[in-house]
Amino acid sequence: MVPDAAFLDPRFTVSVPPHITADTGMDVLTHALEAYVSTNAGDFTDACAEKAVRLVWSYLARTVEEGSDMEARTHMHNASCLAGVAFNGASLGLCHSMAHALGARFHIPHGRSNAILLHHVISYNAGLEEAGDFAACSRYVAIANMLGIAAGTEKATVHGLVRHIKNLMSKIKIPQQITDLNVDKDEFEQAVREMAEKALKDNCTLTNPRVPTVEEIETIYRKLCKGGY
Ligand SMILES: [Zn+2]
């Protein structure tokens, strides 16, 4: 699947509807952030991931709001390729593993599955709800600082990053709860264990910065329900 050469022509994507632009744009952000905190990350994949995140930050909402804005669309097209180069070298992480299982079980598009999971996986990787130090925390802080987000402590800064991601999602009209995607809460609960087991075995989990247990993955899935428990 890796091409020798790629022609990046954003004109091919002008007629893509806003919700697909939003979903695929959040997938780009997920690719870049997961490559950045991957255990396989290096200087070259970091460079591509950092630029991709900057471009998504500046141009995703604009591209969704005005699909024919060719300047914004061109930058998003390039961001998508740069994030692809980053994860081709560094691989991905738990968000993609969980999105693969979630999307397959409930027929949710790939980008949207990643979008609704992304900030929960960031919180988990950085240990935002736990005491102690987590290796990925400082990596998210580096990305947050690059975007002008800073607070008194490392974890507060990552909280800020999470808040900005949630704001971006509401701006581009991506729901944050599984029940907003026409998924029945009971049916979801019944599927949680099986999805978590699949996600644990997914290749993307191998390069996640924090090694999860199946119970931890279940807990993250349950955060997608209204009043997540
Ligand atoms: Zn993806």
Image: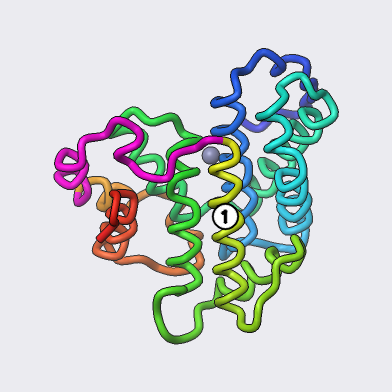
Residue 51: give x, y in percent of width and height: 78, 50
180 to the left or right of 187: right
Residue 196: give x, y in percent of width and height: 27, 52
105 to the left or right of 32: left
Res 157 quadrant in image? bottom right
34 to the left or right of 104: right
Rendered-image quadrant of the C terminus:
bottom left
Tell me the element at label 1.
Answer: helix
Asked whether residue 200 appears in the rendered view, the answer is no
**179 in magenta:** yes
15 to the left or right of 102: right
Residue 80: give x, y in percent of width and height: 69, 37
- Judge whether 152 appears above or below 69 on screen: below
- The amino acid sitting under disc 1 is Glu
Q: Which residue is mark 1?
A: 34
**23 in magenta:** no
Q: Residue at x 73, y 68 (%)?
A: 145
Q: Residue at x 44, y 39 (%)?
A: 175
The image's colour scheme reads rainbow
Q: In the displayed image of the protein, which residue is found farthest to the right?
A: 71
In this view, the residue in front, 56 or 86, is 56
In this view, the residue in front, 97 or 19, is 19
Label 1: how many Cα within 10 Å (few below 14, some 14–19, many 20+): many
Asked whether residue 115 appears in the rendered view, the answer is yes
Q: Which residues are magenta?
A: 173-193
Residue 61: give x, y in percent of width and height: 68, 37
Q: Residue at x 18, y 47 (%)?
A: 189
In this view, the residue in front, 8 or 113, is 113
Res 152 quadrant in image? bottom right
Q: How many marks?
A: 1
Q: Residue at x 14, y 44 (%)?
A: 190
